[in-house]
Image (cartoon, helix red, strand yellow):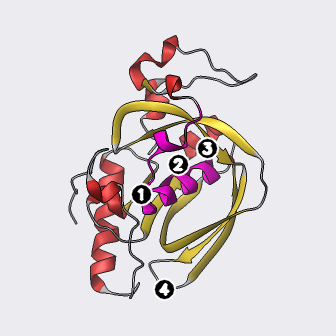
Amino acid sequence: MAILKIARMGNPVLRRRADPVADPAAPAVRALVEDMLQTMEDANGAGLAAPQVHVPLRVVVFHVPEARAAREREEPVPLTVLINPEIEPLTQETAEGWEACLSVPGLAGLVPRFTHIRYRGIGLDGAPIEREARGFHARVVQHECDHLDGILFPQRMRDLSLLVFADEMRHVTPPAAGARTPTAEELSDAD
């Protein structure tokens, strides 16, 4: 296993649509996933997509650790590998939330996401995965799958004046009633 170099905003691999994985059981796919998991852990991320490590394949890994789940008042989500994922919104309702990204280091922004989704894909063991997700879990899955389509979170933002350095967020007044501005530390475990 190895810690891989993370592509940053501006790198062409982040702007293109990733290719489907032809053989999810291939040893090269397993090795990629193991390296992605180690890289995500090393970077303290909630998720990582293969294009972020310079591999243009439709593979994402993510989790919602207990500490983050507690902050979000949600259930934790175990480490999950999705190969060739698909997302289906189960509502047209969206909610804005603060996001950060390992490929957009040091920045955070307020991003609208569907509040309730279903996602499908193939797990590392070759078995199909299908789950429904809400809240932060849904946000993480949508964020990671955006990477597979060449989309970074700033492209989803409605108001680019709210694209800020994470360590300056204490100066930002959340625009939505009841919204809370997270600390830079809380954003450090976001991808």
Q: Residue 64's spot in the image, x, y percent? A: 55, 50
Circles 4 and 2 in contact, beta carbons < 8 Å: no
Write down the region rendered in magenta. 136-158
Q: Amino acid at mark 1?
A: Gly
Q: Is residue 74 left or right of residue 150?
A: right
Comparing marks 3 and 4, which lies closer to the viewer? 4
Give the labeled residue for mark 4.
Answer: 126
For mark 1, what is the residue? 150
Q: Are marks 2 and 3 in contact (CB under 8 Å)?
A: yes
Residue at 54% from the left image edge and 15% from the top image edge: 172
For disc 3, the marked residue is 69
Neighbour tally class for label 3: few under 14, some 14-19, many 20 plus, Cα within 10 Å: some
Q: Judge from the rendering whether residue 70 lies leftward or rightward of residue 56; answer left or right.
A: right
Identify the residue shown where x is 29% and y is 59%: 13
Q: Between 68 and 82, which is closer to the camera in this rendering?
A: 82
Gap in angstroms between the C-alphas marked 2 and 3: 6 Å
Circle 2 crowding by C-alpha within 10 Å: few under 14, some 14–19, many from 20: some
- Residue 110, given in percent of the width and then of the height, sits at 57, 32
Badge 4 amino acid: Gly
At horizontal 27% and vertical 80% (from top left) the residue drawn is 28
Secondary structure found at label 1? loop
Determine if the magenta segment contains residue 142: yes
Q: Quadrant of residue 104?
A: top left
* Residue 184 position in % (x across, y down): 44, 25
Q: Is residue 64 magenta?
A: no
Q: Residues within 10 Å of mark 1 (few under 14, many from 20)?
A: some
Real-space Cα distance between discs 4 and 2?
Answer: 24 Å
Q: CA distance from mark 3 to mark 1?
A: 28 Å
For marks 3 and 1, the one nearer the N-term is 3
Q: Nearer the viewer, mark 1 or mark 4?
A: 1
